[in-house]
Amino acid sequence: MLSLWQESVKNADLGSGAGAPVVASVSGAYLHLMPILGHGIDIVETNRLRKMVDDHGQHFLDRVFTPLEQQYCARNHKRYYEHLAGRFAAKEAVLKVLGTGWRGGIAWTDIEVRSQPSGQPVVYLSGECLRIATELGISRWHLSISHIETHATASAIGLRAADATS
């Protein structure tokens, strides 16, 4: 006898078009298809961010982080550089999903990492990054950030809308 998960996957039309992989998950009795368009990860040394802030001060902070990101990181002085490094890694991970690297027209602040009241990080795009994500069909993001005193890492997944057919 098949489990609910096995039966749902067996009966689901997993075709996602363009050869994009699909991840299926069960929530209650419903099957959710998540067409993954890209995944990026990055790791950053916390001291690298500390050095950039020490060497370039507010100019560096304003060039790389939005006012909201700077405000969030400044809330916890003890973990300030960890939080900066985590957001930096998240921006790099998002760019890997987009497949662009830092190229013409992309600004660091085109990617903003905000936090839900629960602490969950959320990706907000603008400018050239938003244009590229829209062109790729990315409409949702999953983002995870972890950090310790010496390093921060982030994983970003770009998803097509669940109801998209192309």
Image (cartoon, helix red, strand yellow):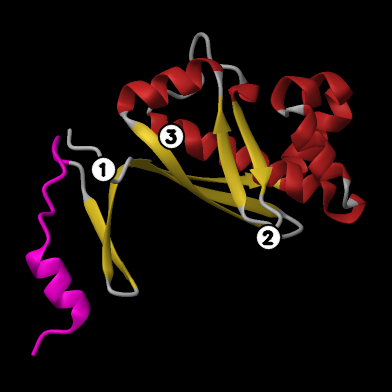
Q: Magenta stretch: residue 14 in it?
A: yes
Up the image or down, 24 lies above or below 6; here it is: above
Mark 3 secondary-structure assignment: helix
Residue nearer the viewer, 21 or 3: 3
Residue 3 magenta: yes
Which residue is label 3 attached to? 96
x, y percent for residue 6: 15, 76
Q: Secondary structure at mark 1?
A: loop
Discs 2/3, front: 2
Reading the image, the residue beneath label 1 is: 163
Q: CA distance from mark 1 to mark 3?
A: 24 Å
Nearest to viewer (mark 2 / mark 1): 1
Q: Amino acid at mark 2?
A: Ser
Q: Position of residue 38 (x, y in %)?
A: 34, 40
Quarter of image, res 111: top right
Structural crowding at the residue carrying mark 1, measured as other residues with C-alpha within 10 Å and reported as few (<14), some (14–19) or many (≥20): few
State which tag comes first along the sequence, 1 or 3. Answer: 3
Q: Is residue 14 left or right of residue 91?
A: left
Indicate the position of residue 18 as horizontal and vertical percent values: 14, 35
> Does 14 appear above or below 37?
below
Identify which residue, 82 or 45, lies in the foreground: 82
Q: Residue 69 shows which numbered tag?
A: none
Left or right: residue 99 compared with residue 106: left
Report the span colored magenta. 1-19
Residue that numbered label 2 is attached to: 118
Contact? badges 1 and 3 (CB < 8 Å): no
